[in-house]
Amino acid sequence: MNVGTVVRGIRTPVIKEGDNLEDIVIDSLLKAKESEGFNFDDKDVVAITEAVVGISQGNYATLDNIKTDIKRKLKSDHIGVVYPILSRNRFAVLLSAIARSTKKITMLLSFPSDEVGNDILYKEDLEKNNFNLNSVISEKEYNKYFSHFKHLFTGVNMVEFYRDLCKKENCEIEFVFSNNPETILNYTKDVLVANIHDRFDTKKRLSKKDTNILLLSEIMSESINGSGYNKDYGLLGSNRSTEEKVKLFPKDGDILVNNIQKKLKKLTGKNIEVMIYGDGAFKDPIGKIWELADPVVSPAYTKCLEGSPNEIKLKYFSENKFKGLSGDKLNNAIKEEIKNKEKELKGQMATQGTTPRRYTDLLGSLCDLTSGSGDKGTPVVYIKGYFKNYSD
């Protein structure tokens, strides 16, 4: 066998609210099989982007739904917003809803970048103007020394962008820049923690006497006036749908992936794994942006996708244990080494240089790169041979 992993982006019809996504995914796979001439095998993987799952579920919330939930949970005229990511698609629309729920916002931003790597200032300006990463930078100081910053890719200064959004909602906003989240408590005790991956640590640091600390994941964790919701992630993983509505991270994904797996088993006789994927977990080498703006790469997957690779490094064995072999003897020795490897290689030299990540994170990253976020029209990805190795 001369081919390893094969990844196919599967075209589907444009998916709208109320569509039967299970049938669309399966029908699109069957059509792709006929046109491309591939077969279904055990341990193949079908992956569906979270966007179309949320759309088909109608899992939306309006800005007024969000405003209502914030007002009933924080009940404050002055809200501190801590460490939001700098995103027009992800957070800006949420900020409009927050601004509607209060009279004043103090926004605490980390620097030189947000949690996922979006810069807020030019790093060289810190030393040039006698600031360091432990400094607290006021809005006045930011305007004087750093406000000429424009993002490398978008050309946007998000401080200006966020300020304008709040003004449109008739909400006062001030900015403070600090890498210590407790700085916000000098301004208000009612705080919305807006970072993603470090949110629990941030909330723990801020949870003191007389503080009211709320996570983004605790907003829209239940339906408000018939809206969508996500009980696990709330507003985390949401995306702008319109100027007045966001699409939430999909809910009840386990039902979808298990139903698709059962139907594919009945149709093909094969045990095919199914997962939902969002952002991939990779970092752009130029912009330094870590792609993962979702709370997890995969919010739902079938049970055999649990775990991490247990692989040996072929290069290590070919250059060490089998350095005196070549040709068929080397190939056969490597195959035997793989067949006889231990079930748990963690920490051994045999694994050096392999990627210690979960299958769902690796597969989700592969799928995100395959489907993209633009106009490819392939919200389903089909992966063959991922779990095969050189000895198979």
Image (cartoon, helix red, strand yellow):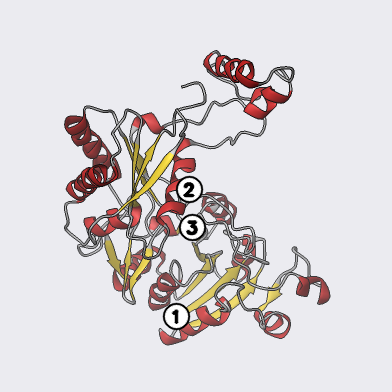
Residue, disc 2: 365
Quick one: label 2, few (<14), some, or many (20+) residues within 10 Å? many
User: Horizontal and vertical percent for residue 347?
Assistant: 65, 25
Query: Residue 218 — which label?
Result: none
Residue, disc 1: 103
Q: CA distance from mark 2 to mark 3?
A: 13 Å
- Residue 187 makes an appearance in the image: yes
Residue at 60% of width from left, 68% of height from top? 109
Q: Is residue 60 left or right of residue 318?
A: left
Asked if 49 appears above or below 114 in the picture, the reply is above
User: Horizontal and vertical percent for residue 268?
Assistant: 21, 31
Amino acid residing under circle 1? Lys
- Answer with mark 1 or mark 2, whichever residue precedes in sequence: 1
Q: Secondary structure at mark 2?
A: helix
- Residue 189 makes an appearance in the image: no
Amino acid residing under circle 3? Ala
368 or 61, which is in the foreground?
Answer: 368
Residue, disc 3: 293
